[in-house]
Amino acid sequence: MTQIPPTLPLRALFDAQHNASRAQVEVPLALRRDRLGRLRALVNAHAPALAEAVQADFGVRSPQLTEAADLFVLRAGMAQLHDQLPRWMKTQRVATPLYLLPARAHIQRQPLGVVGVIGPWNYPLQLTFGPAAAALAAGNRVMLKPSELTPHTSALMAKLVHEVFSADEFCVALGGPDVAQEFSKLPFDHLFFTGSTAVGRQVAAAAAANLTPTTLELGGKSPCVVDASCDLNDAALKIAHGKLLNAGQTCIAPDYVLLPRGREAAFEQAYTQAVARLFPTVSGNPDYAAIVSERHLARLVTLQDEARAGGARVVDVAPVAGDAGSARQMRPSLVFDPAPASRLMNEEIFGPILPVLPYDTLDDAVAFINQRPRPLALYWFGTDHAARDRLLARTVSGGVTVNDTLMHVAHEGLPFGGVGESGWGSYHGEAGFLRFTQQKPVLVQSRWAMGQLFYPPYGARFQRVMGLLKRWF
């Protein structure tokens, strides 16, 4: 390995990776597995230290939460990459149409070259090392820019990566928004971004100057539709878990609930009981994560206060009265009937506030969802399969979990990604491998090719050949 200092300017690091990727276009299985294996070993060996770093950045976030929400999902993804990589790398044979026979065709899967990954702060391990692992498995070099809002985690990631990778294989660039802006302007072969829609627009615009293809994993307002046929207590527990995991700081958290009119009191009771079961206390509870910064907490408080001032009914559903505490642990709440024009109903919440809106018919629920940007996730609860299928057929979202929340993201056989304002491009499993792979079509012509039958001058022979072909097509 060529030892290149990771403290070089971004452009110098990129140039080193770019040159290395062009010097070694073919990346064999053994080398891909070696790189993937080094990343797996890094995560496994330093998992406790990484969880401690995440805890230091959040103020309150238990190692168990990081194990379940970051490390377990990351390990599962890397294990599948390792096991399935030989099959995914294989050249794919493609049937040749009659008019091109006896030519043969195949698709050759090759690395793109250099992949840039800009990661978020909310799941700082899974959402950075995850796409990086897929890019490495696809044979690429990787530059990673983690979030400045998790400085302890980002610094430890940079240190560990530098210890086991050459900088022209995989490197980590640290810094704030200015570094992220410079990073997104580099002429990567692919740029992968996870974060807010507003920043995603900026990243896409910067990448477009280089015609760099992008994957944007954004967010938005993911609806949770409760059908009249559901078990309300079961639904409330699963909605509370999905909403309050990481204190709501999850891109696919249920953003709001659409509830059959007249069930509001029953849902309030069921949700309150569910919160008490999951989090018997809030302030000081290590399993209930803190909001990542005072700025983010202040925004959430403002959203809730504005909704209340606009006529919404706000219900504190935490089990014990008290304030949020010094560790930014915001108390969970329900907000009934917020105004459709309120910021709460037009911005991704990213916190433990759950709006609840009644609906009269399934058509009303569908119309409400379709009047808004297409969400990253959609959740449905109930036993009426006909109603479920109608909803799924008439709405478009990045992904769906039925009778639960979040779980589709843990299925490595399902592509994960957004649509419209919730992002574009998918990863996880084979979808992630292919996202970072050039699928090169190859046609091998035969010496017995009949292509000359289609050459000019176009006379009687051409007319006879076309006449025969028209009978088949």
Image (tube, grey):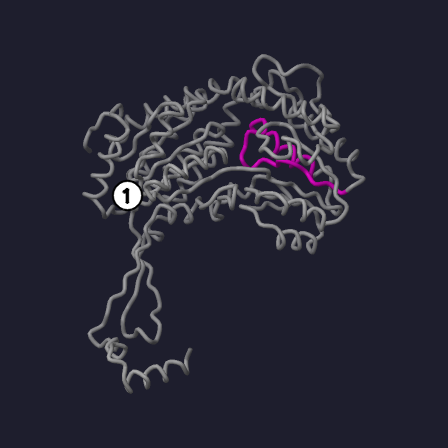
Q: Where are the magenta residues, as a range?
A: 235-260
Q: Is residue 28 shown above or below 218?
A: below
Secondary structure beneath disc 1?
Answer: loop
Q: Is residue 386 shown above or below 280?
A: below
Q: Where is residue 34, by image quadrant? A: top left
Which residue is nearer to you in this view: 416 or 137? 416
Residue placed at 68% from the left, 38% from the top? 257
Answer whether residue 417 is magenta in the image: no
- In this rendering, would 70 be left or right of 17? right
Residue placed at 69% from the left, 14% from the top? 322
Which residue is nearer to you in this view: 73 or 370? 370
Q: Is residue 105 shown above or below 125?
A: below
**How many labels, in total?**
1
Residue bearing mark 1: 113
Residue placed at 42% from the left, 26% from the top? 147
Which residue is nearer to you in this view: 367 or 256? 367
Which residue is nearer to you in this view: 459 or 304? 459
Q: Where is residue 7, by image quadrant? A: top left
Please rate how many residues cluster around mark 1, counting C-alpha atoms within 10 Å: few if below 14, some from 14 to 19, many from 20.
Answer: many
The quadrant the C terminus occupies is: bottom left
Q: Amino acid at mark 1?
A: Gly
- In this rendering, would 434 be left or right of 300? left
Q: Residue furthest top?
A: 326
Answer whether residue 254 is magenta in the image: yes
Give percent across and percent down for residue 444.
Answer: 24, 66
The quadrant the N terminus occupies is: top left
Give percent across and percent down for residue 238.
Answer: 65, 37
Q: Where is residue 114, by image quadrant? A: top left
Give percent across and percent down for residue 180.
Answer: 38, 29
